[in-house]
Image (cartoon, grey):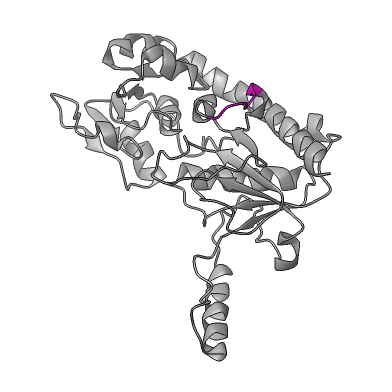
Amino acid sequence: MSQLAHVERPDRPIIVNCPSFDENSGGAIVLHALVDRLRKLGVEAYAVKILKKDYAEVDAHWLRALKRWNIRRKQTRFKTHPSMDVPVAPKERIGEGIIVYPETVSGNPLGASRVVRWLLNRPGYLGIDSKIASSDEVFFYQKVFAQDIQGIPDTRLLQLRWLREDIYSDLGLPRSGSCRMIRKGTNTAGQVPQPDPAILLDGKSHAEIAEVFNRTEIFYCHDPYTMYAYYAALCGCIPVVIPQPNLSAKDWRAGFELKKGVAYGEEEIDWARSTRDDLIADMRAATERENETVIRFLATLKARFG
């Protein structure tokens, strides 16, 4: 982190719209990781969880106030991971802050005058129209997520990982069979690997998934852009992304940040196996590249918002 000690940064707080921490949600993890990383750099950064209702339709003042108090009380239960510093934003700082929304938020529900969009997937991929305004500053987690938006330069990459090497490692156990995960890859969910019935990982905890990765040979991944492909490789299980309709191996790999050790289709399994060590080395080297994306992120916000 030493290279970040003297980086230019905005004077305003950076407030990231986060759900409660969920170890099974890649989006929640990286949103929390962003707040934590910024605070480690001395940046005033917070999380905010957007409340779904303000009960404006309730006529009785006392009842409306009670309902709003109750939902604010629930907000104090905002869950974080004990290893991360992710406090909830004080109400008085929200209006002064730079608000970071993921692409799953439609419009500008906080009414912020300084808005950043962080694309953790393609806008609209999950059926939500982000309604990105021309005044929004846009960053992306993978270049492919911004390919349908005009004028977004490559320098807008903002990428953080939580590798969880405390859980995912190769224990050297005997292996047989396969496993699979659907997550956001519902359009290929019907393509069940044969002949062995693959163990379905959706809904399992990280510890349970790591255990399966350590006793199976192949991980079939229906979600084309997920950290679980890397986690499988750390455990010695070969990740195989199920090819997506109208997405060639070349185009998929162009949008996948670390390109070795992961097969796109079964025909690449031998190649993925032979480049696994290269992938693990690349993952560890990626931390420095992540720091560079944070530097550019802060410099851009400093230039735009002061």
Q: Quadrant of residue 252?
A: top left
Residue 153 colored in magenta in the image: yes
Q: Nearer the viewer, residue 245 or 142?
A: 245
Residue 233 position (above or below residue 251): below
Q: Tell me the residue at 31%/31% (across/down).
A: 222
Residue 188 appears left or right of 303: left
Residue 125 appears left or right of 75: left
Residue 22 colored in magenta in the image: no
Q: Nearer the viewer, residue 278 or 72?
A: 72
In what quadrant of the picture does the C terminus appear? top right
Q: Residue 299, position in %: x, y? A: 79, 34
Give the mark count.
0
Q: Nearer the viewer, residue 233 or 221?
A: 221
Main SS category, magenta section: loop
The answer, for residue 261, to whether it is visible in the render is no
Residue 8 position (above or below residue 131): above
Q: Farthest residue in the right direction?
A: 6
Q: Residue 106, position in %: x, y? A: 51, 50
Residue 160 position (above or below residue 50): above
Q: Tell me the residue at 75%/62% (across/down).
A: 93
Segment tinted magenta in the rendering: 149-154
